[in-house]
Image: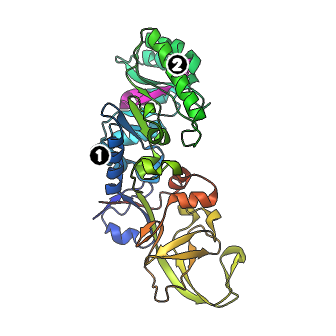
Amino acid sequence: MLRHEQSPSITDYQQCDTYAWFSQRAWVEVDLAALSHNVQQLRRFLSARTQLMVVVKADAYGHGVVIVAQTVLKSGASWLGVATVPEGIQLREAGIKAPILILGATYTLEQIHALAHWKLQPTLSSPKQALIFSNTLEAINCDSHLPVHIKLDTGMSRLGTDWQQAGEFVQLVQRLPHLKIASIYSHLATADSLDPTVMNEQHTRFESAIAQIKAMGIEPPYLHLANSAATLADKRLHYDMVRVGLAVYGLYPALHLRERIDLKPVLQVKARVTQVKNIAQGTGVSYGHQFVAEQELRLAVVGIGYADGVPRNLSQKMQAIIRGVRVPQIGTITMDQLMLDVSALPSLQEGEVVTLLGQQGDENIYAEDWATQLNTISWEILCGFKHRLPRVAVI
């Protein structure tokens, strides 16, 4: 059974046959059973006391934020993490009541108003930011305490107050009106590395910072440090909660972590063959004729391109799967279309399904494969699929 996850840019087909609509071109499939499986696997990996926050920023890494959030919360997650206030508001408007942590920076009057109104929980990264929050909430006559999460910089050199000033920072926030400390956390820079030296150093710094805070008589409600890689790498890093993104979507943050847990990729990218033709030896294909046929071949045009999120730099490096057979992509990938050499499939017809990422038969191609070819990371591949590709939930 298929259910449509509406893309923000598509609003005019709710009354039509959804499958017929999207099947004419290209789409992203989101396997909710695989998503639920991954959450359950992670829950089993964690102790009963450790809560699971699923990071659903960037439209749940391109998977469709509302359907992902609903599924992971039903499957065992208890928190959600997003990057921005609008991302949090989108979840609240969808009726999601679980606690939501804003991982990114928030400073403006409008953002603080929205946080209080929508019951979103911000990250505080500096004393200056804490004072802005307190003064703004006072000015708007806020009659409650906003839960805030204290971010410490233990070596990422991104958001956060230096770990050595943790006690002073936490004391300040605790004294300020209208603020209530919900957690103290930090972020690891090298948890996916085979060499744990830097991760261990950050862990030691985090422990030292927490010791400072507790020595002042302050007991933090929650402590959290681990991302996906750290969650799989070292159970000492789990604390009261872990923040998992990539692993929930079925991909491993590093090859050496594959044996720790059984994950299933959630996302597949598919498209339709729009034309099939034979081309003669010596015929150039696509812009620039970067590919010239060395012999007669059968060519398939597929209705997906770099404007949909298939990187142009994969031109003549990628493969696709049709009828369970891998076929090479040829010529330059264009904005809306790409070409495949389907000589191995002489009876192929227009309208057949092409799997660009995912599994078909015994063959599979995943985001890690594209990332390796492009010398990038799986996160970037997943987040690159544009919203003119409808998200379709496979139930």
Q: Is residue 124 magenta?
A: yes
Q: Is residue 303 above or below residue 180?
A: below
Q: Is residue 120 left or right of residue 210?
A: left
Mark 2: few/some/many CA within 10 Å (<14, 14-19, 20+): some
**Residue 139 rendering spot, x and y as whole percentages:** 45, 16
Q: Is residue 285 above or below residue 136?
A: below
| Residue 153 visible within the image | yes
Q: Which residue is mark 2?
A: 208
Q: Compare residues 22 and 332 and report the one nearer the observer.
A: 332
Q: Which picture quadrant has residue 127?
A: top right
**Residue 228 rendering spot, x and y as whole percentages:** 46, 42
What residue span does the magenta drawing correspond to? Answer: 113-132
The alpha-carbon separation of the residues under discs 1 and 2 comes to 35 Å
**Residue 120 rendering spot, x and y as whole percentages:** 39, 31
Report the disc number at residue 75. 1
Q: Which picture quadrant has residue 335?
A: bottom right
Q: Is residue 215 magenta?
A: no
Residue sitting at x 60%, y 29%: 155
Q: Dividing the image into 4 quarters, which one contains the C terminus?
A: bottom left
Q: Is residue 185 above or below residue 266?
A: above
Q: Nearer the viewer, mark 1 or mark 2?
A: 2
